[in-house]
Image (cartoon, coloured by chain):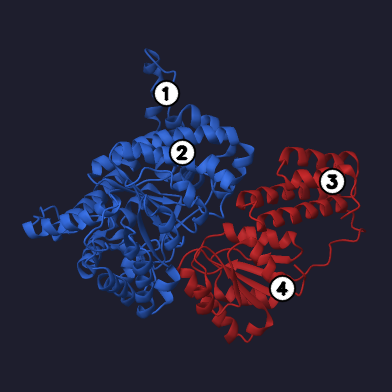
Amino acid sequence: MNDMTDEEKQLVEWLADMYEEEAIALSNKMLLEDGKDPMRVLDLCRAAMDIVGQRFEEGEYFLPELVLAGEMLDNIGAVAKPLIKQTEGGEQAKLGKVLIGTVHGDLHDIGKNIVSFMLDINGFEVKDIGIDVPVQTFIDEINEFKPDVVGLSGFLTLAFDSMKETIEAFGQAGMREQFKIMIGGGQIDETVRTYTGADAFGVNAVEAVNLCRNWMGVAA
Amino acid sequence: MNAPHEQTPEAKAAYDARFQRIMDCVNLKQPDRMPVVLYATFWLAKYGGITCQELMHDYDKLMEVAERSVLEFDPDVTAPHFLNCGIGNVLEKLDFKQLQWPGHGVGENQPYQYLDREYMMADEYDDFLFDPTGFYLQKYLPRVAGAFSGLDQLPVFPGMAYLRLAGGIRPFAKPGVREAFEKLAAAAEEAETFFNHHLEFVQRVKAHGYPLANGVIAVSPYDYIADYFRGATGMMKDLFRHKDKLHQLLDKACTMLTRQTIAGAKASGHPIVMIPVHWAPDAFMSPKQFNEFWWPPFRKMMMGMIDEGLIPMPLWEADCTKRLETIKDIPEGKCIYWFERTDMVKAFEVLGDRVALRGNLSPSLMTTGTPQEVDAAVKHLVDNVWNQGGKLILDAAFGIPDETPVENVRAMFDAARNYAG
């Protein structure tokens, strides 16, 4: 987005720099007073989130910035989305479909939610099926959603076995080759990846995005 | 149950020698061998062939399994197992809301799990800051445990004085308040039973010659607010939205927690205080945020404890490599730093002349590896930390993970004795 007006640049900068009050006031003015195209405002948000993701990767931003960015985006989205006219071009084409859930026995979701958010703002269609997800639910949801990537999340050590069981069940259901599997969570490392039979693991949300981008053949 | 457990002179000598190893590590002196801890929570259920639900609710089964594990593995120190595990009946009677535990939200063979929620709203900082006890009684406690509901009808005490007391105490007659007191008395009786079992366990292992690794468990000011009041995402947003109030509450929490921890530790008669640390890891906030919000109130709390002769033992969860230089700013020979995923060799290089170290065989190794691999991992720590002069207290990353095969625990203890005395 090189063709931005000064005001648009200001919105991107405030969002990327975590100036929440200023950014929300400006986006509200654009949407509600100036009648600006809501799709354009959402594009500006995406441009800001690219900067946030880049700063996270570079070690300048951490979880609190991702959480606040998600919050700002939700607030702007809540104002912008009802203003989008049905006739307009609609949603951008998605890069790929990711199904994500916390494996059975584990109730943790903070990391999973942040991964879902980062995948979403990076152009993936994400279906988050929640916590403590039974193996059969994963299989049913996969059959329906037909994801390119399945993300298994887990914080507790009991998740090692739940992940292994879930991935083995994908094999038994004859669907293991239909998608890539990534795992993540507090205790996950290469030893766990080997143990569970997943294709890859990631230690943070940006790694999850990069794994999905690579698998979908998208340049990082 | 309450028969006194005499400590023979031999057991006393063994007890003293074991505790001295820990104290030598704390004081940065060389002990006669590398101490090893037996610290576990729900692994005890796997070890004892009982369910997690039984471990949490059946005092006799927990006592038997915990005592047997100490005798079998012959550690230098062990965990206060009742404080960690034996709380099921008290939680039931409290109608506790912040956890789901086996038989109460999760299956009989699953560990308890914390429910991350906002137990204090963003606009309640002033209420908590102005009158912490009032906020606890009228807002916080009824939210976190059903037995307290009804206490929200209590009168507001600050400002009430002299003859106004006569009319002011009327809410104590309300049915909801009476009911709360009855439920709390029942929960407190259960808590007495639970705590007496804890004391009994301490006496039993003491009679066998084994000290505890710590007397009480405390929490850092930041984690106290993040975990138990604002919730993870609430707290992260407060770093931007309610910065000043958060600073005020951190300051207040530091004073409250320091006082409470000192009083509890002194009552326990044990100088070492375990402090699980949840929000310090490298990935959870920037160095700037860590240095502004997390570290200063925690350092102040640790200094307050050290001044009272206590030994803080923070368990630095996840990877805290980037924090090592900052957390080095503590007097030498006063603390045990327990690391979970931080590379212990790196921690030794930065902190070896400042604090004793504890840890840190990885959970994935302990649960999925072979005894030979566990042996090799212990040897790695002995070669690169203990034999280099590090005052290492060997343990798994956060104690023995629940699913660890018993032979891997044996391998950990055997390797420790084999390679480091």
Q: Mark 3, chain letter?
A: A
Question: Residue beneath label 4, please?
Answer: A214
Tag 1, which secondary structure? Answer: loop
Q: Is residue A43 above or below residue B72?
A: above
Question: Residue beneath label 3, please?
Answer: A9
Same subunit, labels 4 and 2: the answer reads no
Q: Is residue B177 above or below residue A180?
A: above
**Extreme residue in the left direction:** B9
Three-letter amino acid code of the residue under disc 3: Lys
- For the residues labelled 1 and 3, say whether their Cβ atoms are less than 8 Å apart: no
Q: Mark on residue B387?
A: none
Q: Which chain is blue?
A: B
Three-letter amino acid code of the residue under disc 4: Asn
Confirm whether residue B120 shows in the render.
no
Q: Mark 1, chain letter?
A: B
Quadrant of the image for the N terminus of chain B?
Answer: bottom left
